[in-house]
Image: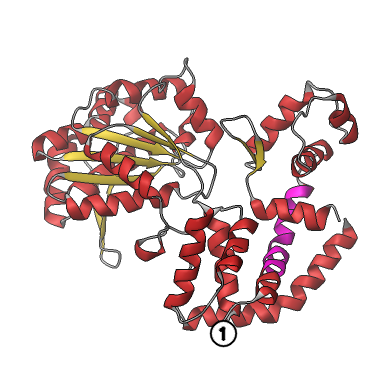
Amino acid sequence: MINQIILFQINLFQIDLLYLYFIFKILIMKTPFVYGHIAIDENYTNREKEIRQLSANFLGLINTIIISPRRWGKTSLVNRVSEILEKEYAKEIVVCRFDAFTCRNEDQFYRAFANAVMKASFSKWDKFVEASKKYLGRFAPNISFSDTAQSYELSFGVKFKDHDMSIEEILDLPQTIAKDTGKKIVVCVDEFQKITDYPESLEFQQNLRAHWQMHDRVCYCLYGSKRHLLADIFSSYDKPFYKFGDIIFLNKIGRLDWINFIQERFEKTEKKIAPELCGRIADFAQNHPYYTQQLSQQVWLRTDKECNDVILEQSIRDLIAQLSLLFINIIDNMTIRQVNFLVAIVNGEINFSSKSVLTNYDLGTSANIKNLKKALLDKDLIDILPDEKIIIQDPAFEYWIKTEYLK
């Protein structure tokens, strides 16, 4: 392992100057590929079926749950649909979005919820202040205005959880505003699975469901990055949110769609890339949106006029070298049997409880397989698909295990 680390450090040192060059190119020109943040406008790829379905659900006020592994484009999809509806139906519908990732308890959730609903419903400063007094006046809210960001923020002097009546008012806030304004309101909550970390989480979920299911002018779109936790929240018979709404299992964008997208983005910047090379980019990334865009960007940066095999292979090598120290750190924080389980997945094993697999990969007893799955799910390293197939979430990590770690 020490020799591997030294080797990777040398590789990284060798490409440092190259990366500085490409960073400079990014600074002086606009890259046609986007990853790591929300894709908008022409940077958004396909998802026409999902856009139609989610748009129809929002307009019809149908509660929707979006489930998929990390970085498959859930947030970009929700934002894309929100953009479309806010342009075409601005007088009829309000879409409010907030991220629950930083909400560590119920009280912080209520505050973020109230802020999101108020800011989406009343965008002008004077209307925002007036509405804050009308709907939240008894909580004595403080309103701050950021001149640079042109945004408003509410803070409260009370802890909502200490007052049952205040909790009810906050959770019913979008319904109350929707009735008064005559508009429909869609509330989108990202990283919704974070509520499972709260003390008395089941009681909190019961309270949310009790209020939200009664709203007839509001619908809720709930999604997040922990697929297995979301599936448990909405698919388990004994959980409060069982059958709360329409569940959309987000699939990967198709290979042909990626080929067309990559080639089109090259052509718009007066560069060329053959469909076969576009397909190899998608294949390396296993059609994963984040890595397909990232590798496409690396290839595009290295291409002056026309891409070729050498450029693509070099881009893959450099991308893996760039990520190697991260992957080594992941391996170092795992047990030997957790690593062996990943290796078994990479090698195409399916029956992990069979005697031969347990022996060949030193996985212990068949009873240990359940613990290994749970540990790797909690680390976001694997995912279990609806057909029970186990996959490694990160295609670059899987490639690194095959080509570097096992070598």
Q: Nearer the viewer, residue 221 or 60?
A: 60
Q: Amino acid at mark 1?
A: Asp
Residue where numbered disc 1 is placed: 304
* Residue visible at 28% across and 54% down in the picture: 83
Can residue 124 be seen in the rendering of this structure?
yes
Question: Outermost residue toward the top?
Answer: 238
* Residue visible at 26% across and 53% down in the picture: 84
Residue 326 lies in magenta, yes or no?
yes
x then y, percent, for residue 368: 78, 25
226 horizontally vs 174: left or right: right
x then y, percent, for residue 367: 78, 20
Disc 1 secondary structure class: loop
Task: Specify start and end residues of the magenta stretch as a single range.
Answer: 316-331
Q: Quadrant of the C terminus?
A: bottom right
User: In the rendered image, which quarter is residue 327 located in?
Assistant: bottom right
Instruction: Tell me if mark 1 has few (under 14), some (14-19) or many (20+) residues whose alpha carbon lies within 10 angstroms of its own.
Output: few
Can residue 34 be seen in the rendering of this structure?
no
